[in-house]
Amino acid sequence: MDARSTATRQHQPACLAAPEISRRGAHPVGNRKRRNAHRQHHNAHAGLDTGDIFLQQELRIAPDDTSETLAPRLATAGADLILETLRGLQAGTIEPRQQNDSQATMAPILKKEDGQIDFSRTAAEIYNRLRGFQPWPGAYTKFRGKNLQILKAKPANESVPQSELKVIVDHLVVGCGANTALELLELQLEGKKRTSALDFIHGYRPKENEKLGALM
């Protein structure tokens, strides 16, 4: 999270060129080299998200945090940071610090298909994408020809063939890339209610060698 001098995406490029216009904004950033990584900030023009930084504050991201659980904490921290920045500017105790634009890259716009799970990725990669893609575009695959949303999951210390769905002592596990596995905790099949993995096992009884992602 940082507070910087910038112009919001609602302002046109002509406004950005006007020297008298300046804005103060708080931006959550996980990597200083990635700009506009949040889908709400993807419509960027030249000159946006590039102003000097006044203050920064680091927030710990818990291993089970998602974008939904992290957002309220970022909002609270951002509000406090804005107030601290304004007080510092008024008192003359804060000096702006220029960003290193040579290290900046633009994050791509998230699309619905980004949520489709690629089981050739490792379990850790899929788990982190699931966390970051909540609530949209989510993380989904196919089960018996229907869309299956994976709502909660965690890496598992099991060995399962890639994309194969396996029941291991009432635990629902799917094989991922690099000989890793993901335990599925909460799911939602197309047209059905959200359910726990155990209820899913009892209701659909996954077959031996059944795979996720297959059309049938």
Image: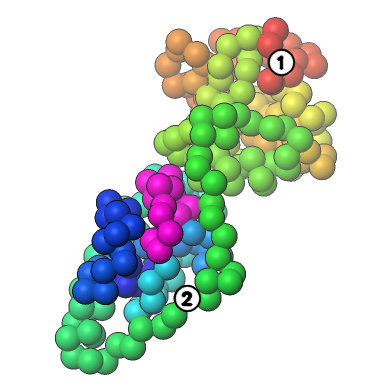
Instruction: Tell me where the magenta segment starts and ends, as one range.
Output: 36-48
Identify the main secondary structure in magenta.
Answer: loop
The answer to whether residue 207 is left or right of residue 30 is: right
The answer to whether residue 125 is left or right of residue 18 is: right
- Mark 2 vs mark 1, CA separation in Å: 46 Å
Residue 159 placement (x, y as % from top left): 81, 36
Could you say which quadrant of the image residue 180 lies in? top right
The number of numbered discs placed on residues in the rendered structure image is 2
Observer-nearest residue: 179 or 135? Answer: 135
Observer-nearest residue: 190 or 100? Answer: 100
Residue 51 visible within the image: yes
Instruction: Say which label, 2 or 1, has the lower sequence index.
Output: 2
Vertical placement of residue 106 versus 21, above or below: above
The answer to whether residue 204 is left or right of residue 187 is: right
Q: Which residue corresponds to mark 1?
A: 214
Residue at 49% in and 59% down: 35
Residue 94 placement (x, y as % from top left): 30, 88
Residue 61 visible within the image: no
For the N terminus, the quadrant is bottom left
Vertical placement of residue 31 versus 196, above or below: below
Residue 139 placement (x, y as % from top left): 55, 32
For label 2, count other residues whose C-alpha is less than 10 Å away and answer few (under 14), some (14-19) or many (20+): some
Instruction: Check disc 1 and report its element: helix, strand or loop.
Output: loop
Instruction: Check disc 2 and report its element: helix, strand or loop.
Output: loop
Residue at 78% in and 14% down: 208
Magenta span includes 28: no
